[in-house]
Image (tube, grey):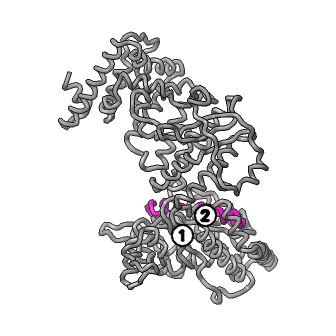
Amino acid sequence: MSDYDRQPEGSSQVNVSSIEGRDTQVHEGKKDTPLVGQRPAVSDAPVGRSAVADAAGLGEALDIGASIRALLARPRDEVVNECKRYVVGQDQVLSEVVGLTYSCLQRMERRLSGVDDLDLPRACAFMLAGSTASGKSFIMKVVCRVLGLTLVSVDCSGITGAGRVGDSVSTELRRVVEAQRRNPGRPVVAFWDEADKLVRQTKEGSRSFDSQGNFLKLLDGDPLELEPERQGQTPVRLDAGRVLNVFAGAFMGIESIVRKRLLSGGIAMAQGGSAGLMGPEELRSHMTLQDLVSWGFMPEFVGRFGAVVSVPALSRESLLQIVKGSSRSLERRVTNLLGPGRAFRITDAAAQRIASDAVASGLGARRIDQLANHFEAEATVRLGCDRDVNVAVLDVGEDGRLCLGFLREEVPDEAERSTQSGSVSVEVPAARPSQQMPQSRFEPDLQLVSRVDAVVGTSLWQDCTSTTAGIELVAKKLAGHRGWKCSDSRVREAAELLLRAVTGYLPFDPEARQTLGYVMAYLKFMDVGLKDGWTYLDTFFFGTVEVCGLRGLEERAMTDPSVATPASVTALACYRRFLRYPERVRREAGQLARERTMAATTSEHEAAWLVEDIRDVATSVGMGAMGGMSGADGFIHML
């Protein structure tokens, strides 16, 4: 027996207990109201009440039946073309998904018209299989929006994380019930994302599938009775016949299963090659329902799918269109964000650079947003406070890195931009800050970076900041300026925290390098004030896309596992502690954190003293690495 409750065969109930922290309020209608396609139960209630209930169920069936017929009357090609306005590079997938959706809607319509379920195809679900960031979720969102369907997204990774798996399934099904209640005349699409996480790895290395009993009954289309999970809830019924279930997953490593099947079957490819020579994407394009069974799903579950749709990774050309050249490109979306009379331009060189980076990272369109977040925020702030410019231009600088420039020119209105949405991208003039206008206060002061790094070598600084202990020690050295008299005893500690936070942040900023010059340049962002008391430096740590357009380190760490490291957690903790001090303490601490380094740029004596201290820290870090002790222990031992 497994460690979760299995439902008896033939039962239509999902009777589970509550899951902590996942409460869902549902406002149910009358329990005795018959659902569409369900025979009314025999009741001792007066005839009048039964007639009212029958009329209510019949009225609901007529409403949704008319709604589905109106959807089916719309030509499929028209729906596909409308979806292509939003989805780039997945034309074949869109055609398949729209076709499968129409097929499921047709089944619902025939069922509501009185055709027996046994005389109709049972499968009213399908699987989207594609690598991470291929656009599976986005495709379903667009299709549902264009067709006017209600979408309920479910993260299956949370289902497998629960102690009693069936509980989570029941909780999510109550969300579907609530969607049906709120939209009585519309079909509901239940999108089960991360479906591959439903198959768990066992200790023996094999895979097992969870919650198959609940899903089997859902996919059969029969009404489900959901018993109360916690106090205050009442039993509710889910009309599964009104639900289109779409599952999606990355299925990392399934290529080996597909290759083994193709080779065992002796299948020869059209190009004259073999399955053994196929790449991952080509193998994924040959996925079948049989491969899902080999992956670990039960045959009874997979047998209820109508098809498996392979979603290929976005090509470099498609990613380039997402950057610029399409009606929903990054260039146009940021321009819409800036508002009337302003524009965001991306040169061809910058677009090529972003697309290449997105391909190399394997993150697809998500990487495009990551690269653009910083520049979006800078353009928003700069154009909002500087009336001399109205256009931001993203270009590639002489050092090969992305840079943002500003200029002023006549910007077409929204109507004119709409007529140009399908046009081929045109090279826009570069607007480099060094050539067109003075250094922006929203960009690192590169002259300051050069001055400081000329005093303290970059390799020496990187040696002393290679460990957390080294960063802590060098922060104490920089904040320990002998000539500074603190007005508050907390200033020096706040300065140390600030230096540790900024130094720890730099490795996670693709536009910066780990040098003392960049530490000083980023500390200057404390002087750039924004709304509600925020500084520009604050947004680097705790900014969110919804609030300021910039994805700060904390938000990035929550969505990108490569950023969620002990180093980023330490940097965030230090900056959070720094922000707890009063504003006057923070301001003085910011000055103290820069004072000793800035003095070294104008005094040879201060420069020699600073370099010597940094060299001592670097030596202690090296001694700790060789002796198996921490950097701090090595430094104390050396003293």
Give the side of residue 103 with respect to residue 54, left or right.
Answer: left
Residue 241 screen position, x and y as percent? 65, 76
Q: Type of residue at label 1?
A: Leu
Q: CA distance from mark 2 to mark 1?
A: 10 Å
Q: Quadrant of residue 617?
A: top left
Q: Nearer the viewer, residue 212 or 404?
A: 404
Circle 2 is placed at which residue position?
139
The image position of residue 75, as x and y in percent, is 74, 74
Do the CB atoms of the residues marked 2 and 1 lie less than 8 Å apart?
A: yes
Count residues near mark 2 (Cα–Cα under 10 Å), then give few for <14, some for 14-19, many for 20+: many
Query: Which amino acid type corresponds to the residue marked 2 in the rendered image?
Result: Ile
Residue at image mark 1? 128
Mark positioned earlier in the residue sequence (2 or 1) = 1
Image location of residue 615, percent across then percent down: 27, 24
Q: Residue at x 82, y 77 (%)?
A: 48
* Residue 157 falls within the magenta-colored stretch: yes
Helix, strand or loop at mark 1? strand
Q: In this picture, which residue range is highlighted in magenta? A: 138-164
Q: Nearer the viewer, residue 205 or 367?
A: 367
Q: Which residue lies most toward the right here?
A: 48
